[in-house]
Image: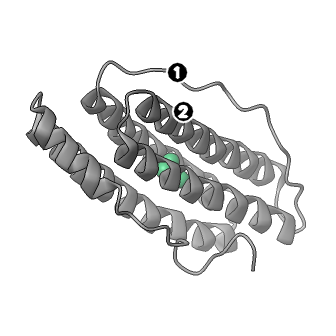
């Protein structure tokens, strides 16, 4: 059984994961609007991953006798000045999320909830991957700079991304 403090903290983090999905969808439609369809595709898949992160956390909460609660989702930013600014935002955002996950692990430890601390290790590892992939993409976009044909090449490359459910979890088992 989860403590109330742990239950609330998990619901708050699930809300932040859903916000991440919302943010990346917003970026996806921003890229659609500037006709960079590969970047839009990459962001759409990223939003899908965030939805998986959200539901995995809510499922865990409910499965441990807690109550999964849908909290209000903040509206994300609507537009960016350039692809580089958007991908910089992704990188900054993912680093901030890593901080939130670490804080959540701390709550589990303070609550002497070893099961939740262990469950959260999945997110700790996932964040390492999220930071790596966003850093990678940011570097590609930075290298392209203002060169339109280099940006279009990066756009095509990111457009090849395929959706993979994150390790060991599918939304619809
Ligand atoms: Fe859920 O990893 Fe990004 O935010």
Q: Is residue 61 left or right of residue 82?
A: right
> Which one is in front, 165 or 168?
165
Which is more toward the observer, 9 or 26? 26
**Mark 2 crowd level (few <14, some 14–19, many ≥20, 10 Å Cα):** many
The disc placed on residue 26 is 2
Residue 135 in sight in this render: no
Kindly identify which numbered label has been placed on residue 78: 1
| Image spot of residue 28 (x, y percent) | 48, 39
In terms of secondary structure, where does tag 1 sit? Answer: loop
Across and down, in percent, residue 123 comes to 52, 63
Quadrant in which the C terminus is drawn:
bottom right
Q: Earlier in the sequence, mark 2 or mark 1?
A: 2
SS for callout 2 = helix
Pointer 2 and pointer 1: residues touching (CB < 8 Å)? yes
Colour theme: one colour
Depth order, front residue of 67/105: 67
Disc tally is 2
């Amino acid at each position: 059984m989860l403590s109330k403090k742990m239950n609330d903290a998990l619901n708050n983090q699930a809300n932040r994961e859903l916000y991440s999905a919302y943010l990346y969808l917003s970026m996806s439609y921003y890229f659609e609007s500037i006709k960079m369809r590969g970047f839009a595709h990459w962001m759409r898949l990223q939003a899908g991953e965030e939805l998986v992160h959200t539901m995995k956390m809510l499922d865990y909460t409910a499965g441990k006798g807690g109550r999964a609660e849908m909290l209000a989702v903040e509206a994300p930013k609507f537009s960016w000045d350039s692809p580089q600014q958007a991908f910089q935002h992704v990188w900054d955002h993912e680093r901030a999320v890593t901080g939130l996950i670490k804080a959540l692990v701390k709550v589990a430890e303070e609550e002497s909830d070893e099961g939740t601390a262990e469950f959260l290790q999945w997110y700790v590892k996932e964040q390492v991957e999220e930071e790596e992939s966003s850093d990678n993409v940011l570097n590609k976009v930075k290298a392209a700079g203002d060169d339109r044909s280099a940006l279009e090449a990066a756009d095509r490359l990111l457009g090849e991304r395929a959706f993979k459910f994150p390790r060991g979890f599918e939304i619809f088992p």
